[in-house]
Amino acid sequence: MQHLTPNKAIDVAVHGIRKHNLDRDPMIASIIDKGDAAAPLLVERLDIPGHSYYLIPFLFEGYVGLIVQLDARDGTIQSATPVAKSKSSLFLGVEQAIDIFSQRHPGLKLQKLKLVWQPCRESSSPLQPLYQITIEGGAYYMGMNGSIYDNLTPFGRGGESHV
């Protein structure tokens, strides 16, 4: 499965915002024209095998002002969400996630770490991915707030969670 490069994803996101006139919103126009894109985050969909998306935070005046969700293969904009004057990062970095996990589970050896998402009780929004932390014999999941989960709880019918 071929993904857009992170730099290409940024270019495609900016082009798509202009093409679909999302920059008619003065806030989005300012962010795109005067702000900078932070490093895109590649997120793998667990519920749709083979599908991934980028989350591209756009910074303006030191704050995240816009997050664009973009299909990682074809560049389709899935959402462009303005963020009200937020901290400079809405996402835990890889090193932060490793440190948190190592402190809480000092005896476990982390083998692999990647961003994932599926609709679940632990994260109902694709804008809030989780780290999947692979260890020998299994995996844990970490939310962007540092919470660690043994598994993900899918939603049942009518928005109810499976228990």
Image: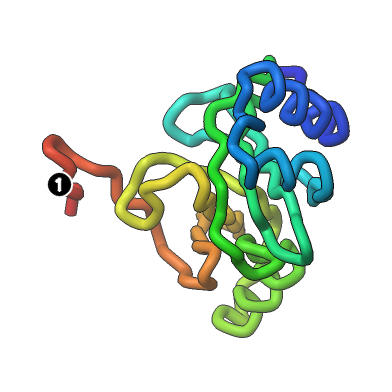
Q: Residue at x 57, y 24 (%)?
A: 51
Seen as rendered, the residue at the extreme right is 7
Lateral position of residue 88 relative to residue 48, left or right? right
Up the image or down, 145 lies above or below 107; here it is above
Query: Which of the 4 image quadrants contains residue 30?
Result: top right
Residue identifier under label 1 = 160
Within 10 Å of the Cα at label 1, are there few (<14), some (14-19), or many (20+) other Cα atoms? few
In terms of depth relative to the viewer, which is nearer, 142 or 104? 142
Query: Which of the 4 image quadrants contains residue 24?
Result: top right
Up the image or down, 72 lies above or below 145; here it is above
The three-letter amino acid code for the residue at tag 1 is Glu
Up the image or down, 72 lies above or below 93; here it is above
In terms of depth relative to the viewer, which is nearer, 19 or 3? 19
Q: Residue at x 59, y 58 (%)?
A: 133
> What kind of element bears circle 1?
loop
Q: Residue at x 53, y 50 (%)?
A: 129
In the picture, the quarter occupied by the N terminus is top right
Position in image of residue 77 (x %, y %): 60, 25
Query: Which of the 4 image quadrants contains residue 97?
Result: bottom right
In terms of depth relative to the viewer, which is nearer, 9 or 23? 23
Q: Residue at x 24, y 43 (%)?
A: 155
Position in image of residue 154 (x %, y %): 29, 44
